[in-house]
Image (spheres, rainbow, N blue to C red):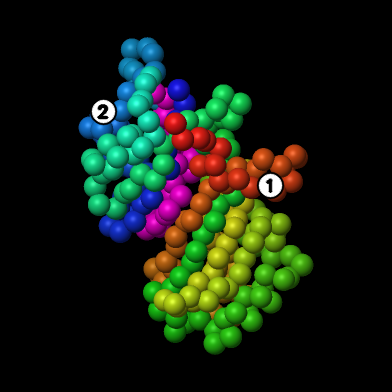
Amino acid sequence: MKIRIKFRKYGIMKFIGHLDIMRYFQKAMRRADIDICYSSGFSPHMIMSFASPLGVGLTSDGEYLDIEIGNEQSSASAVKRLNAVMAEGVEVLSFRRIPEEKASNAMSLVAAADYEVRFRDEKFLPDNLAEAWTAFYHQSAIPIVKKTKKGERELDLKPLIYQAECRPSSDGSCIFLRLSAGSADNIKPELVMEAFAAYAGFSIPGFALLIHRKELYADTGLEGAGRFVSLEDLGEEF
């Protein structure tokens, strides 16, 4: 049975990198007595894959990993047992069966991600933040230079930002972003904020951004039509 687990990562655990999170969940599966399947061969390992590694220092309500299991009583039972062995900073939100017709692994499905960007100190921001953000986003093109492992390439961010707005918030300014994600064009919120700062004529101090990932989506539209569905909604409780 193929299973998709959704979890949140918060607090001090935001400083734990992806490889350590992988090891953490391997131990959690054993401690929670999840009947997880192993690969065959001389060095069997847990069949487990994560949707999209979260950068160090970011928090999230929408992290995913896929596993295969032999047997399980119910989604509720598995969530309860896993949370009983979780350290503070990680909470399992759902444990859902993936139907065969939707059984592609989460990593290959990711097409978009939602983020909220807040600021440790707003002194460096322009006074008219909302107006400046609206003008920035409504440009016909947002050209930037993106650094990759192979060097640098010019890129237009505009078609890769599916939604963006400056939202009112009780705890300070908040920029909401829905960005292209996955293996083809994985756009980080930091890159968008750097482009905005260059447009609005200010600089972002180090460690000034507080970035929270809200959700990851698959694109179920035809030929990239942009019909986004959360990875969680592709599964079902049992």
Instruction: Please provide the residue range marked out in magenta.
Output: 48-69
Q: Specify the quadrant of the image occupied by residue 195.
A: bottom right
Q: Which residue was labeled with disc 1?
A: 227
| Residue 113 tag number | none
Q: Residue at x 39, y 68 (%)?
A: 207
Q: Residue furthest top?
A: 41
Q: Residue at x 57, y 62 (%)?
A: 177
Q: Amino acid at mark 2?
A: Asp
122 on left or right of 88 = right
Q: Nearer the viewer, residue 83 or 104?
A: 83
User: Could you tell me residue 144's position as x and y percent?
Assistant: 64, 62
Give above or below for 74 relative to 92. Answer: above
User: Could you tell me residue 82's position as x and y percent?
Assistant: 29, 38
Q: Nearer the viewer, residue 121 or 25?
A: 25
Say which quadrant the N terminus sits in. top left
Residue 166 visible in image? yes
Q: Helix, strand, or loop for circle 1? A: loop
Mark 2 or 1, nearer chain start = 2
Q: Residue at x 62, y 51 (%)?
A: 180
Say which quadrant the C terminus sits in. top left
Assess whether residue 73 is covered by the magenta stretch: no
User: Could you tell me residue 76's position as x and y percent?
Assistant: 36, 37
181 on left or right of 79 = right
Q: Amino acid at mark 1?
A: Arg
Q: Classify 10 Å Cα crowding around label 1: few (below 14), some (14-19), many (20 and above).
A: few
Q: Which residue was labeled with disc 2?
A: 33
Give above or below for 229 relative to 157. Answer: above
User: Could you tell me residue 222's position as x and y percent?
Assistant: 75, 39
Q: How many marks?
A: 2
For marks 2 and 1, give the CA distance.
Answer: 37 Å
